[in-house]
Amino acid sequence: MKEAGRIRMTTPLVEMDGDEMTRILWKMIKEELLSPFVDLKTEYYDLGLEHRNDTKDQVTVDAANAAIKYGVAVKCATITPNADRVKEYALEEMWKSPNGTIRSILGGTVFRTPIIVRGIEPCVRNWERPITLARHAYGDVYKNAEIKIPGPGTASIVFTGADGRTLTEVVHEFDGPGILQGVHNTESSITDFARACFTYALDIGQDLWFAAKDTISKKYDHTFKDIFEDIYEKDYKDAFAAAGIKYFYTLIDDAVARVMKAKGGFIWACKNYDGDVMSDMVSSAFGSLAMMTSVLVSPSGVYEYEAAHGTVQRHYYRHLEGKETSTNSVATIFAWSGALRKRGELDQIPELCAFAHRLEKATLDTIAGGRMTKDLALITSLQDVKVLNSREFIKAIRVKLEEILKQN
Ligand code: NAP
Ligand code: MG
């Protein structure tokens, strides 16, 4: 397509490059699927591990601040260093997870959504539309204090206020050895979580479900329920009604039962532990980790889009040996389309939103037409599929995309 026909952008998208196989895909996606059609305006941050090390991880902080400045970011998968990586990359330090750093600067909630396509059927027959999972990523059992009780005695919890006053509750009178755990959460974190969930539900026009165990946990879980309810009543009820969507609270066990019978097409907000467990169940039941997108939404409305999977290290090592890879780029493509659509919405560039939609359609049509990467070929219900390598798959999407763009 000629230069002049490319879609113009007005505000830069914050682009966070990453590592290994996804870094290779990132470049191919830009070259084949984006740059020919969009006059890409990005502010580029190289979050590849080498550059993070060179900048003492300052680049991650800078990228997060740029996301706050511009409002929309797209991120490639990145290595979270462990001892092996420190050796492999001769790192100065075991730098923290970039996602953790970015989340601690932006705050907010991660929403994960499976990409549904004809030919990859969910294990749960009645799931016709995606279920988006929102996990409250703070507190509870993930920031606990634990004691292994050696023998008989009394276990209590004590809160000492800043004014010195104390609140005490006996947990249990032990008559032998046992275990004890203290967990907490904060009103501000739960409030941010609730706001991010309501905001995102309005943004994508889907119902919001939230569940806890308030019948058993009359103060702890009940507080979650109350905070959601208060914020909804105060700030979102009218907007939800206007958008024709609902907020629905139920008990966690009832929610699980209903999710299994539901058709999908809603957001399921979960407490930290429930979200940890349920996101793995929902994503594997929908088919493949490679078909899961993820967006971090901050309470102030900053959006950061990425694939839910990692850097696909095994494939990268094959790639380095000069061997062919068949790595699925769908979630990374959808991270870009999500970010471009959001940029288009904010800047009122309808062509950019339309392009994002067509890019997604081209990707899904390619798979539904029987051309896919190996991971999908292994689970598809389609007959006679053609397995493509990483580059061929992106090129096949390019062909479809050009067809779609010609029709419009
Ligand atoms: P991974 O990259 O998600 O890959 C695990 C396995 O899942 C792969 O070996 C592959 O299976 C399959 N897979 C995942 N994505 C795929 C795709 N797009 N196409 C085809 N197959 C795919 O997880 P990992 O290997 O445990 O982690 C690698 C690195 O990623 C780690 O350094 C970790 O820190 C990082 N990570 C980053 C993020 C993030 O930035 N958001 C998230 C998770 C992990 P087969 O090998 O069987 O084909
Ligand atoms: Mg988990």
Image (spheres, rainbow, N blue to C red):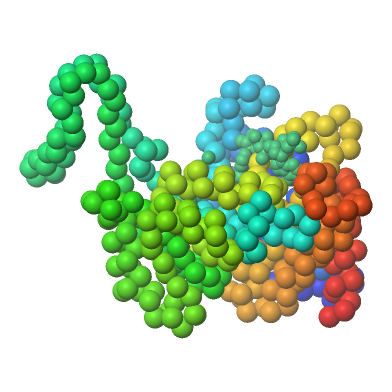
- Could you tell me residue 124's position as x and y percent? 63, 54
User: Where residue 35 sits in the image (x, y, percent)?
Assistant: 81, 62
Left or right, 67 with respect to 155, comes to: right
Q: Nearer the viewer, residue 8 or 237?
A: 237
Residue drawn at 27 percent across, 22 percent down: 178
Task: Name the residue: 31% across, 47% down.
Answer: 185
Between 343 and 252, the one lying in front of the other is 252
Q: Which x, y percent locates residue 367?
A: 82, 58
Residue at far bottom of view: 242
The quadrant the N terminus occupies is: bottom right
> In this orientation, does residue 279 appear?
yes
- The C terminus, quarter of image: bottom right
Residue drawn at the location 54% of the way across and 48% of the way down: 279
Give the camera-side residue of 104 and 201: 201
Residue 223's place in the image compared with 84, above or below, is below
The image quarter containing residue 374 is top right
Classify 307 as above or below 82: below
Outermost top residue: 150
In this view of the protein, can residue 303 be seen by the observer?
A: no
The image quarter containing residue 181 is: top left
